[in-house]
Amino acid sequence: QVRLVESGGALVKAGTSLRLSCHASRSITSVFAPKDWAWYRQVPGNQRELVASITSSRSTNYADSVKGRFTISKDNSRKMVYLQMNSLKPEDTAVYYCNTLKEDLDWGQGTQVTVSS
């Protein structure tokens, strides 16, 4: 059973950067690599929203709200998915999760990102 472990969240000031990491533990490269991966975020009381995605061929897509500021990447050999977040805004405050684009894995605990103004 693949376990998703997110890390890298923190309390930061607006305009700064953070890099989030997601490790798909108990996975193997042959299972990890063909999947399309994504980062999501959720604010209490709101639905979880798709922030960024990366396909098996490394094609990326972003929500309009983060386009030009966030970059998703992955390392198949390490079974890692990353989210580089630049020029952070208070509205980026949320718990961030990774999963496949199909959301077919159990959700991890997420990592809290808080951006102060």
Image (cartoon, rainbow, N blue to C red):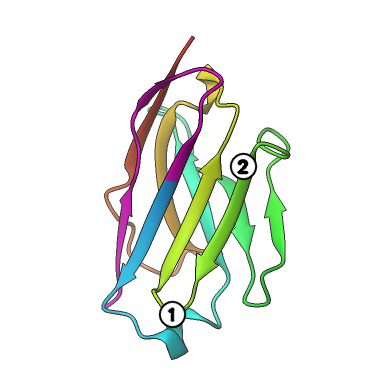
**Mark linked to residue 70:** 2
Tell me: residue 32, above or below residue 6: below
Q: Residues within 10 Å of mark 1 (few under 14, many from 20)?
A: few
Q: Secondary structure at mark 2?
A: strand
Q: Is residue 14 left or right of residue 3?
A: right
Residue at the limit of the structure toward the bottom, as seen here: 30
Image location of residue 74, percent across then percent down = 52, 66
Q: Quadrant of residue 107?
A: bottom left
Q: Nearer the viewer, residue 27 or 42?
A: 27
Residue at image coords 53%, 45%? 84
Residue at image coords 62%, 42%? 70
Give the magenta part as a residue range: 1-19
Q: Which residue was labeled with disc 1?
A: 77
Q: Is residue 17 within the magenta segment?
A: yes
Image location of residue 82, percent across then percent down = 48, 55
Image location of residue 92, percent across then percent down = 52, 28
Q: Is residue 42 left or right of residue 85?
A: left
Q: Is residue 54 left or right of residue 97?
A: right
Tell me: residue 92, above or below residue 75: above
Residue at image coords 33%, 52%? 6
Q: CA distance from mark 2 to mark 1?
A: 22 Å
